[in-house]
Amino acid sequence: MNIILLGPPGAGKGTQAQRLVERHGMRQLSTGDMLRAAVKAGTPVGLQAKAVMERGELVSDEIVSALIGEELDSLGPDAGAIFDGYPRTAAQAESLDAILADRGRKLDHVIELGVDEDALVDRITGRFTCASCGKGYHDRFEQPREPGVCDRCGGTEFKRRPDDNEETVRTRMAEYRAKTAPILPIYDARGIVARVNGMAAMDDVTAAIEKIVAA
Ligand code: ADP
Ligand code: ADP
Ligand code: ZN
């Protein structure tokens, strides 16, 4: 199975992708995570992407599509793929079609997480993750069960993203509206879009996604 999770920054893509990984053993392909790893490692791609990401603008289509192709090749042919944060432009959507076709894969679902923009700044500015395993948390909406200790791995170090500030989030939302939302009609025309209310409680969003994946 190959699915895209689509939605603006803070919609819950990463949260729901992690849950699909845990429940179904699918693999999460997050271009944001791949780019952050490249920045951290100081690779040529990372050097190019760093300032763009700090501004909240989109990294070039060529870079992210190359990353997705490589990552997909590291999956077994039977492993399901969750595309989280990719595609974000019409050119990327086109590349993804070719990338999947080349590997004998087909897109099963595009799950759009619908959210109120007003809620997104709160979600983003309260977001943090476990530094060891990457599990996502939120200052108010999802704290570790034991304060300061990761539920999943017991890690005690957490981190916040430099681009998770209000100003950058506004740019990221504008990029989503201008370049990413317009790709939905491409998938609508194929009849593979499912819309989920991303404002619902996390578990309810998960239940709605489970229904789509099981159908
Ligand atoms: P995205 O990957 O789409 O940018 P995340 O999954 O990282 O979004 O979610 C952003 C923040 O909002 C995280 O801190 C997460 O814990 C929190 N969050 C995710 N889904 C919900 C929800 N349904 N209700 C409240 N908070 C949520
Ligand atoms: P979020 O979880 O908030 O939606 P991501 O982690 O997916 O954010 O992306 C963080 C940043 O990485 C983006 O603001 C952008 O600069 C870059 N990025 C990630 N994925 C893509 C992509 N598919 N195309 C272009 N830029 C991307
Ligand atoms: Zn952890």
Image (cartoon, rainbow, N blue to C red):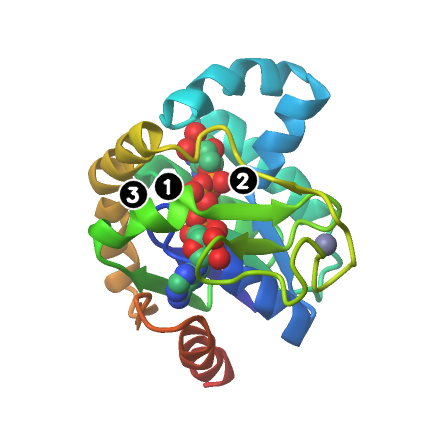
* Residue 103 marker: none
Indicate the secondary structure of the residue bearing disc 1: loop
**Residue designated by label 3:** 180
Image quarter in which the C terminus is found? bottom left
Question: Residue drawn at (26%, 34%), measured in percent from left and top?
Answer: 170
Q: Which of the marked residues, 2 or 3, is nearer the chain's N terminus?
A: 2
Would residue 86 appear left or right of 31 to someone viewing this image?
Answer: left
Could you tell me which secondary element the residue under label 2 belongs to? Answer: helix
Check mark 2 vs ligand 2: CB closer than 8 Å? yes or no.
Answer: yes
Q: Residue furthest right?
A: 154
Tell me the amino acid under the disc marked 1: Arg
In the rendering, which numbered label is found on residue 31? 2
| Helix, strand or loop status at disc 3 | helix
Foreground pick, 147 / 181:
147
Cα separation, mark 2 vs mark 3, equals: 14 Å
Q: CA distance from mark 1 to mark 3?
A: 5 Å
Q: Quadrant of ligand 1?
A: bottom left
Q: Amino acid at mark 3?
A: Thr
Q: Quadrant of the N terminus?
A: bottom right
From what the image shows, is residue 62 above or below residue 130? above
Q: CA distance from mark 1 to mark 2?
A: 10 Å
- Tell me which numbered mark, 1 or 2, is placed earlier along the sequence: 2
Check whether the beta carbons of the residues at disc 1 and disc 2 lie within 8 A of each other.
Answer: yes
Residue receiving disc 1: 88
Front-lying residue, 98 or 17: 17
Left or right of residue 88, residue 86 in this image: right
Mark 2 residue type: Thr
Residue under the image location 33 percent in, 62 percent down: 112
Q: Quadrant of residue 149?
A: bottom right
